[in-house]
Amino acid sequence: MTTLSLTRRALLNSVPGGISAAALALLLRAEGAPFTDLKPRKPHHPAKAKAVIHLFQNGGPSQMDLFDPKPELDKHHGKSYADKLAGEIEFVQHAGAIMRSPFKFAKHGKCGADVSDALPHFAKVVDEVTFLRGMHTTNITHEPAVYMIQSGKITPGRPTIGAWVTYGLGSENQNLPAYVVLDDPKGLPVNGVENWQAGFLPAQFQGTRFRSTGAPVLNLEPDTKRPASIVKAESAVLSKLDALHKRERPDQPILDARIASYELAARMQLAATDALDFTKEPKALQDAYGIGKEPTDSYGRRCLIARRLVERGVRFVQLFINLHIWDTHNNIAADLKTACDRTDKPTAALIRDLKDRGLLDSTLVVWGGEFGRLPIAQLPPDKDERKAGRDHNKNAFCSWMAGGGTKPGLTYGATDDLGLNAVDGRVSVRDFHATILHLLGLNHDNLFIEQHGLKEKLTGVEEAKVVKGILA
Amino acid sequence: MRHLLSLLALLVAHVARAADAPTYAKDVAPLLQAKCAKCHNDGKTRKYADLDLTTPAGILKGGESGPVIVPGKPEKSSLYEKVHKGEMPPAKKDALAAAEVETLRKWIADGAKLPAVEVALTQHDIIPIMLRHCTACHGRHKQEANLDLRTPQAMLRGGRSGPAVVPGKPAESLVVKRVSAGDMPPPKKLVEACVKPVEASELATLTKWIAAGAPVVDVRPDVATTTPDPLVTDKDRDFWAFKPPVRPAVPPSRDPKGSAHPIDAFIVAKLEAKGLALSSEADRPALMRRAYFDLTGLPPTPEEAKAFLADKSPDAYEKLLDKLLASPRYGERWGRYWLDLAGYADSEGKREQDLARPHAWRYRDYVIRSFNDDKPYDRFLKEQLAGDELADYLSAREITPQVYDNLVATGFLRLTPDATWANITGFIPDRVEVIADEIDVLGSAVLGLTMKCARCHTHKFDPIPHRDYYRLVAVFKGALDEYDWLKPMIKPGIGPESIDVAPPRLLPFVTATERRAWEVANLKLPAARREVEPQIQAVWDRGEPSPTYIYRRGDYLMPGALVGPGVPSVLTDGKTPFEVKPPWPGAKQTGRRLAFANWLTQPDHPLTARVMVNRVWKHHFGTGIVPTLANFGKAGVPPTHPELLDWLAVELARPTPPAPLPEGRGEKRAWSLKRLHKLIMTSATYKQSSAISADAKRLDPANALYSRAPLVRLDAEALYDSLAFVAGKLDDKVGGPAVPIQVRKDGLVTPTSTAKGWRRLVYVSQTRKQPATHAETFDFPQMNPNCIERRDSTVAPQALHLMNNGLVDQLASEFARRVQRAGGDDRAKQIDAAYWIALSRPPTAEEKELGRAALRDLTAAWEKQQPTSTRDTIELKALTNYCHALMNSAAFLYVD
């Protein structure tokens, strides 16, 4: 027997009956107690989407260089504009003039969606996609903006959307975590492990990291290698010790839960190993994802694994990329292209693969970052315009969704002439969250947990609106 | 018919659209009169929330939090919002029809025009604008161009270029000129000063005020007076938790053999009512182990265990408790619980850099030291809330250990996640968040009230007006002032340089001894080679707090009424002013926090003692008498044993006349937590076995009546410390800077070892972004901002961690060597030693047999694997596996 080792608190399904003594006590004392297990739960209303693949693009992908063409930028290229943005730019001394996009735009697909030539593969699947051009948020700093898009508030400590979704719906597979995080072996995104925390929800709903290269989960092998026969002999000893201990202590559910947690650890190992082993997938499919080739190998693996996880009933898969590759402060022409090159082909393959397998209808794919970018240039210290990038913009950014009950081939909302502000079809982060929940059959006002007398929700106390216009 | 109806509907809609915007006189006034006047000024006595909705002036003035309408912005107007959400009117039958709600919305959207009530602007419409945009450079710390814009008087006085304000002449007023020209605040310096540009509406307000002659009215801050509080009634105060605890009579014991212990009398009375009795006493090894873990977080050594079990004297158990309470391990265990409440961390959090707090450990050590010294709880609170106002440290000839402790203690008020060290995350709303977190910590940890709910509006369940939250904010304003902010540290190199000249929130006042030692060791060295200068992470009152306005909806851009310092009215009689005076004659400190701390620690405070005894009880019994530890309000769970709670609370704060204790140890000290532990732990209730009887299972399944002791899993610290302790590798060094962690490439975070082994987890660096994997796996919380109650989950990663983690392996082999040293080659002796070391008792016959079989099987398995290894090697390997299994076993992890 090989043994699986996961060090993060999160690798967890709840064990049958496996809840804490305190939680149990509360359960028996109070009505309307919170969920503490991962059993599948009925949604609030019928829904097409059963699972989510969240392709989180940390850093702030540039809307006017990818999906939201702005001819006015060409017209006003070189004009000074920075003074109008005082207080909205961290590095005022680096602010340059209005800057046109170094990328060329064209209409794609039957729907005629605008995509720049930075994303040639993705441009071919736009007929499955709904673009949200009117996204806006509240903060121009990565950390608070990432907390916001993940958890609905600009401060740490709240459950992320993946935690809320699994809290509300449980999981279809009891041998795998309900909420799996596929982080980039190159490094964690901004806010690190806080991106998949359960906050004040029970620990069961926290995301679990699966690694896409090498051992699927942290420390698949024990730190100190032991032969399988020894591992087996030692677990036999432990089982006997625990059986004896439990015999003397009947009616202590917590001890049953503990024993179950050891059994589950073993089962989970097999299921996790199987889910992450894509070597039996056809070669052509692996090629389509860009696996085995740079620069797409790593992201391609994660995309393919994401599909395999969703296929196995995992509720929420969140795919990350290392520290803000989309954060193109400098040299946007080259750096944005690099980010696109790493992700473009795998993303398109994922959508096509889901579609081919009939999984796209029941899987909501969400793509986006924490904010957008400014229409003006950010100059390097030597003021060389050829190496210019763009600074952060909270007032407009573009995300997209595909499948899961969204309207395919739709461009929703608009920004002003410069791409500075969302002006039409405006979608706040709260609206964005409410819409994702709605597509999964959850009403954001009814998905809550009582916390010190307050009904805590993902969308908080201010009004959130489902973006009805993008529903199929 | 249906067609006709739709036609009619269409027609009505058309007419409604065509109609002009609603007017106050025709549409709004009758509506408000009909639906709202019953409570918001019935002309007699009723004027709830201090709000009069029957006159234009009343509507403009607004209620307790300020205006209820924001012309043009229905969504920001509470008058519309409350009605729209159906929160008002409270009775469903009075609810407004959709069309009526729409009328209100339209009227507000159209500018909420009211008949000729000229809104007279006052200085309080202007001061907040100055605070938001100007005083960073023209205020307390800096007066660029010799200009101070904090008060109307100073504005008139002006600076180098003349008066900032010329009453009646906005065009000649420099402040208007410079702002409208876009020169001020300087656009390029906004981020460096953490200031936003002035909005057009703000400039308009400023202009209008000056045009009107810059009127200054005498508005006194809203504070408690001798007049009964209009917002909180005596009926509101008539709730158990808001009334001072009164010592209840101890129920007579009906069982002739029953214990005379008062705790038991209360518990047994409830059990008997259900037809239950206390369970029998736990066996001595179980009770001993429970006491060790409860008080020190560690098991006994085999020698200690054997000595206790051999002590047949009647007071053996009490002597054990005294010994454990006197152990320095006690403070490490119980100090940790307090650190959870306070939200302790060794880093600032929030930003990616997760900046270290290199001086935070002094607060951690202060807490541990305070528990070990049995510092009275009232004093402990006073130091943490107002240590800087307890002694004049600035004029002190020498910083004594007491003064040092006072200042370190104030670190309590700066533990929350804080990114205000960086300009871009140091704007006023960022600072307001930090203050809100501190109030949340105070409310949840000390008051047992959900104070934070009143930040944006009056509390929905408890009688805590919006006003009271901001009175509390005003208490802390001398130290935590969003308009005169001290950054946690000045860290150049990230973002643009700050133009802030205020010092960081660090004080150099370590004890004279430490300071001299540092100077001797470092002053001769070149600066680069010096050790970090000892400093204290603290807050202190600076004597000139900016005014406190109620923030409507919690938004700093919507300041409402001016308030002064005060405490939640519901916890007072409602007609006693909150008296603030400088802490000593001539002090520049306001004394606000000291006044608050003195109020909080009155022996008959309704909550302070109750909340604390409930917490101590929780850590001994698994649940609190009030299960919702941080919520004693109406939405909390009421106490299961209210009389017992009150009896304990009174006993803590106002012990019965100082009588000698049974063991003749002098007087009962008020607020002594060690005395409280002993009181609890000598009860039969505490000493019960954790076995569940058939009756208890049926009649008290959740143990709400305390019919048995709880079976408890070791928490993250007790488990980690015990693993090292059992391995003989616990380094028992006390205090000092945090033990660094190592981060492996794959994400595993492990504490580093010392020459003597591993230090207790409480001393290990606790950064927000990289918690030790062991701690995180076993439910160590994220401090956001603090942790009221840890979740004790039972999940697969815990199993995997204990089975596969390298450090656990390493400790298991140390444990095996220790067993071998104690038991030699004799397997029976080894098993015996292993049980004494790990489980503080001898093995039973069955366990001995199981152990022998285990060692036999493991040896055989290893022989098969490594036929060429020596017998000694094989046997040590087998023993290591056995010890590893014991470290994984439920018997090790769970305390009976």
Image: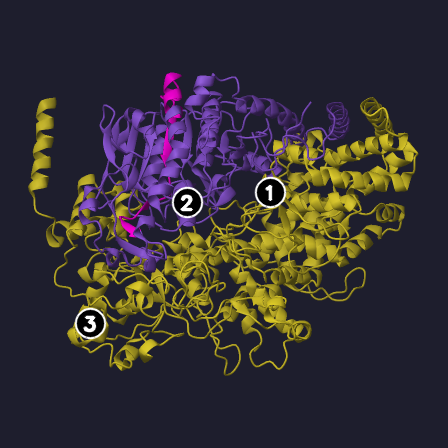
Compared to residue B527, the image places residue A443 above or below, namely: above
* Most foreground residue, B502 or B867: B867
Q: Write the residue at 45% across / 36% down.
A: A320
Give the CA separation, mark 2 to mark 1. 22 Å
Is residue A61 among the parts visible in the rendering?
A: no
Give the CA separation, mark 2 to mark 3. 40 Å
Asked whether residue A355 is drawn in magenta, I would say yes
Across and down, in percent, residue A258 comes to: 66, 31
Image position of B305 (left or right of A146): right
Residue B776: which numbered mark, if any? Answer: 1
Give the CA separation, mark 1 to mark 3. 57 Å
Residues in magenta?
Answer: A350-377
Q: Amino acid at mark 1?
A: Glu
Secondary structure at numbered mark 3:
helix
- The quarter of the rendered structure image containing the C terminus of chain B is top right
Image position of B604 (left or right of B727): left
Across and down, in percent, residue B688 comes to: 74, 41
Q: Which chain is yellow?
A: B
Q: Amino acid at mark 2?
A: Val
Q: Which residue is mark 3?
A: B177
Across and down, in percent, residue B609 comes to: 59, 58
Q: Which residue is mark 2?
A: A146
Label 2: how many Cα within 10 Å (few below 14, some 14–19, many 20+) = many
Q: Which chain is purple?
A: A
* Most foreground residue, B110 or A57: A57
Secondary structure at numbered mark 2:
helix
Asked whether residue B306 is drawn in magenta, I would say no
Across and down, in percent, residue A171 comes to: 49, 26
